[in-house]
């Protein structure tokens, strides 16, 4: 799994959404998840969570299938509590061996920020080695 931050302050004109404030991208196999903090015209923040899956058609061309959730500030606490409850349930009921099979080591990618990026299969190369 790979994640990163992108799109600080991109503006949308003539749209119901005034401004995209912050984004986090998580790449997980065939799926990509986008966590986008946006602002309404009234400068109220909300979160959109988008799952995007790349699909190949019979003609060989691909398209993206997307599913989106809009989460508003007044629902954050209930959403987080419920999400944590079901994740804890899964961790409690799923055998440890099976969890290790389905939870690959995550790769992170910070886009648009100056931070160190841990990446799987990284090799340290010195210029003298080239």
Image (cartoon, grey):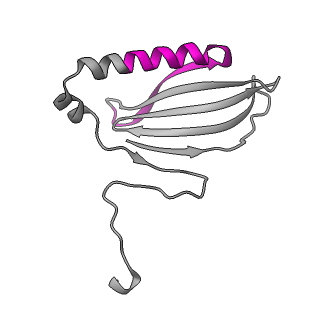
Viewer-closest of 77 and 115: 77
**Magenta part of the protein: which range?**
59-87
Viewer-closest of 66 and 72: 72
Residue 11 placement, left or right of 83: right
Q: Residue furthest right?
A: 42
Q: Residue furthest bottom?
A: 128
- Which quadrant holds the N terminus? top left
Residue 91 placement, left or right of 39: left
Say which quarter of the image contains residue 129: bottom left
Q: Position of residue 63 (x, y in %)?
A: 44, 32
Q: Position of residue 107 (x, y in %)?
A: 39, 47
Task: Tell me what residue is drawn at x 60 percent, y 54 percent.
Answer: 113
Task: Tell me what residue is drawn at x 39 percent, y 55 percent.
Answer: 119
Task: Tell me what residue is drawn at x 55 percent, y 32 percent.
Answer: 35
Say which quarter of the image contains residue 124: bottom left
The answer to whether 98 is drawn above or below residue 10 in the figure is: above
Q: Position of residue 11 (x, y in %)?
A: 75, 38
Residue 17 placement, left or right of 24: right
Is 55 included in the stretch rendered in magenta? Answer: no
- Which quadrant holds the C terminus? bottom left
Is 65 included in the stretch rendered in magenta? Answer: yes
The answer to whether 25 is drawn above or below residue 65 in the figure is: below
The answer to whether 122 is drawn above or below residue 52 in the figure is: below
Task: Tell me what residue is drawn at x 69 percent, y 30 percent.
Answer: 38
Q: Position of residue 102 (x, y in %)?
A: 25, 32
């Amino acid at each position: 799994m790979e994640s990163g931050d992108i799109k600080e302050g991109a503006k949308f004109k003539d749209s119901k959404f005034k401004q995209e404030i912050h984004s986090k991208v998580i790449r997980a196999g065939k799926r990509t998840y986008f966590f986008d903090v946006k602002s309404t015209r009234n400068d109220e923040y909300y979160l959109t969570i988008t799952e995007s899956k790349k699909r190949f058609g019979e003609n060989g061309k691909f398209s993206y299938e997307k599913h989106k959730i809009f989460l508003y500030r007044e629902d954050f606490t209930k959403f987080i509590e419920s999400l944590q409850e079901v994740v804890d349930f899964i961790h409690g009921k799923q055998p440890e061996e099976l969890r290790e099979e389905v939870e690959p080591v995550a790769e992170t990618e910070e886009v648009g920020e100056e931070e160190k990026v841990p990446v799987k299969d990284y090799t340290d190369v010195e210029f003298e080695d080239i």
